Amino acid sequence: MKSPSRLIFLGTLAIGLIVAAILWFMPYDWKADSAARFKVEATQITRDHSYFWLDVHLVKSGSEPHVKEKPVWLQGKDGEKLDSVGVTFGTDKDGEVSEIWYKFWVPESAFHGPLTLHLNEGELTIRSHADVPSLEEGQIKVYRTKYW
């Protein structure tokens, strides 16, 4: 017969593994706007004095192609529009855009509310919280969910 402490340990371990698997495979945003034609895969921020570099990695989520001519911007809580300072496109074997990496130079003040990316005809939630990320100068952090 197994000891009770061993059963408790195994039960706790199993619950921990289930929670870890759910968090690992959880999408960035459960309700991504299909009009955006892409979904957020991950974001990365790097502190640079009183600003942050924000990199947004998008993956194609539908059959409609990306329209490169349409403006793309990041919008803060107060309606402030931030244009992308860099973009990289990844293509599939047919030459269609299948991944996009946008780079934004974001002031610390923009992190006092949620951030929304306007892309094609849709909107994607990049960040839903309202506190400034606590990072040291040059520190990098990657997020796989909008709850940061």
Image (cartoon, rainbow, N blue to C red):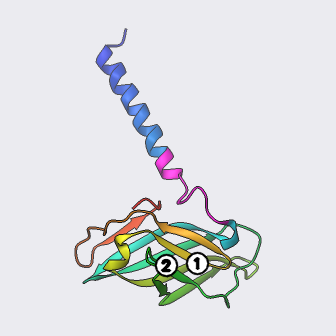
Residue at 60% across / 72% down in the picture? 123
- Pointer 1: what residue? 118
| Residue 24 within the magenta-colored segment of the rendering | yes
Check whether the beta carbons of the residues at disc 2 and disc 1 lie within 8 A of each other: yes
Residue at 44% across / 68% down in the picture? 114
Helix, strand or loop under label 2: strand
Q: Quadrant of residue 7?
A: top left
The x and y percentages for residue 22 are 50, 45
Residue ranking furthest to the top:
1
Residue 137 vs 125, above or below: the answer is below
Please tell me how crowded label 1 is: few (under 14), some (14-19), or many (20+) other residues with Cα within 10 Å.
some
Residue at 40% across / 69% down in the picture? 113
Of residue 86 and residue 91, the one placed in the foreground of this image is 86
Q: Which residues are magenta?
A: 22-33
The x and y percentages for residue 137 are 23, 78
Q: Is residue 106 left or right of residue 38?
A: left
Q: Earlier in the sequence, mark 2 or mark 1?
A: 2
- Pointer 2: what residue? 75
